[in-house]
Amino acid sequence: MPGPEVARLVGMTTLATAPAKRQRRTAGLRRAISPLALLALWQIASTTGVLPADKLSPPSDVVTALIDLWQAGALQDAVGISVQRVLIGFALGATAGVGLALVAGLSRTGEEAIDPPMQMLRTLPHFGLLPLFILWFGIDETPKVTLIALGVAFPLYVNTFAGIRGVDPKLIDAGRALGLSWSERIRHVILPGALPSALVGLRLSLGVAWLTLIVAEQINTTAGIGFLVSDAAAFSRTDEVVGGLLVYSLLGLLTDSFVRLIERKALAWRVG
Amino acid sequence: MARRLIEAPPQAVTSPAVRIRGLRRTFGSNVVLDDLDLDIAPGEFVALLGRSGSGKSTLLRILAGLDLPQAGSTEVVGAASVAFQEPRLLPWRRVADNVGLGLRRRSRADRRARAAEVLGEVGLTDKTDAWPVTLSGGQAQRASLARALVNDPELLLLDEPFSALDALTRIEMHALVLKVWNEHRPSVLLVTHDVDEALRLADRVIVLSAGRIVHESRVTNPRPRALHDEAIAHRRIELLGHLGVAEPESSHPAQKESA
């Protein structure tokens, strides 16, 4: 994974207060105008023939195509399979990433053993491993899920590890002075202190999970959203292609808002 | 449990609450505590004065169990607790949960009740469920003091707890510390570099320099103390001298309200 992942950390943590929320709602309405205008422009360009349907279908056709796919049951099947790949890959990668971060973060020996190889492997573009994975695991689910797991593990590892190590040592000392044992200090001081950073890692890793899914599903696949898209492309059905992309982004948006919700609940202490 | 039935001012004859012998702590070639001996009587309020690097915070950290000496012994009768210069509240715990953190062996309801009680003592009843980030500096320091008091400790270690507060809040905190000390009578070791603070609060003021005790003053004036009192003013000059600061002789002695 590229280095700037950590640098983006600061920009991605969002805090909201009540008046700020209200302000954002009106700002949100105004910000919706230009995307809607672009959508209208696209529709007009298509209906007037400026934009031929075999290059890009109008928004109305995209919606119709999605409804047709839904009624045929193909959309549900594809989404089900894709979501399943992401969930399994994410679960594996998150377990590995967070697990390794805990070991490296909570013990010096663990850090010395785990951190150097992790930092080295982190720079490897994981998409580049796809041919190797196909060679190792064949063309079924395994290479896809493994690739997602690999993509997920690194941002979670890096941010959780940084979070653990970033906990104010004065707070840990205060815990010791209060008589907290090692495990109690981990539970009451270190883990909650590492949570904000770990949640940034969670958001980044979910983004990587969907991206990896899209790449992995382009190759040798017979099911899933990626299959739907490549099959549609073979028949120049640009309405279905765009529809598939739309589903991808909606799913990404869904998981991102889920993490935002967790952040709002779990990090309420930052705003009070 | 040590019983506190001392009515008379503590004397050296009672067995000490804190007994330090031959304490030595070095960091590399830097000797921070050099063969230090110190006794603190039960219920005695001791202020430890010293410049930065005199070893006063290291001594407190050793008594708090946060640091280990290379040589020597420390005996503390009963429980010790610390309030630090920064309040060090856990930002992700509400005020009452921070205060109750030292009471983990008790039930949650018990912890909340005891925390509420101590928060009442320090005047923070209305902040029980607040997040630490919403507290003012003085309020956070009160919460930190409450957390130190929640176990009803025999020894209260105060590591410059008022130095980051504004002057008015500091005066309020001095009164508060005297109040809780009067009510619970723990031994207190206050680390500070503020001579006036030491003179206002302590029974005994100790000056630490290069890891050794270089001076001791007993302050017997009844509290609350007026800093312009003749005896106190005299002590100040004496203490500042031992800290290596020469206070200019007042050119207007008439302004001192000599009682």
Image: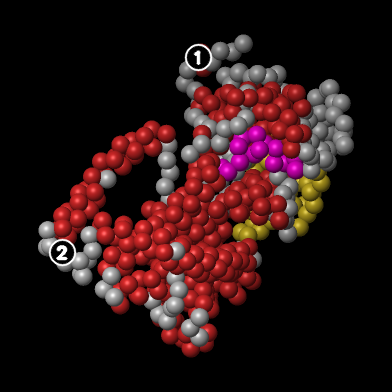
Question: Which residue does the image show at 53% across and 32% down from the upper left?
Answer: B135
Question: Judging from the image, what secondary structure is the residue with disc 1 in?
Answer: helix
Residue B47, given in percent of the width and then of the height, sits at 67, 35
> Which colour assignment does the render follow?
secondary structure
Marked residue chain, label 1: B
Residue density around tag 1, few if under 14, some if 14–19, many if 20 or more, within 10 Å: few
Q: Which residue corresponds to mark 2?
A: A51
Residue B202, given in percent of the width and then of the height, sits at 68, 29
In whole angstroms, how far apart are the C-alphas of marks 2 and 1? 93 Å
> Which residue is the extreme one toward the front?
A72
Question: Judging from the image, what secondary structure is the residue with disc 2 in?
Answer: loop
Q: Quadrant of residue A234?
A: bottom left
Residue density around tag 2, few if under 14, some if 14–19, many if 20 or more, within 10 Å: some
> Which residue is the extreme one toward the top?
B259
Residue B51 vs residue B190, the one in the foreground: B190
Q: Is residue B98 magenta?
A: yes
Residue A208 vs residue B178, the one in the foreground: A208
Tell me, for residue B255, which label it has, or none: 1
Residue A230, given in percent of the width and then of the height, sits at 35, 75
What residue range appears in magenta? B91-104
Provide the major secondary structure of the magenta segment.
Answer: helix
Question: Which residue does the image show at 68% across and 24% down from the upper left?
Answer: B121
Is residue B240 something one can see in this rendering?
A: no
Is residue B16 something one can see in this rendering?
A: yes
Q: Is residue A262 above or below residue A5?
A: above
Quarter in which the C terminus of chain B is drawn: top right
Mark toward the viewer: 2 or 1? 2
Residue A29 vs residue A27, the one in the foreground: A29
> Which residue is the extreme one toward the bottom?
A135
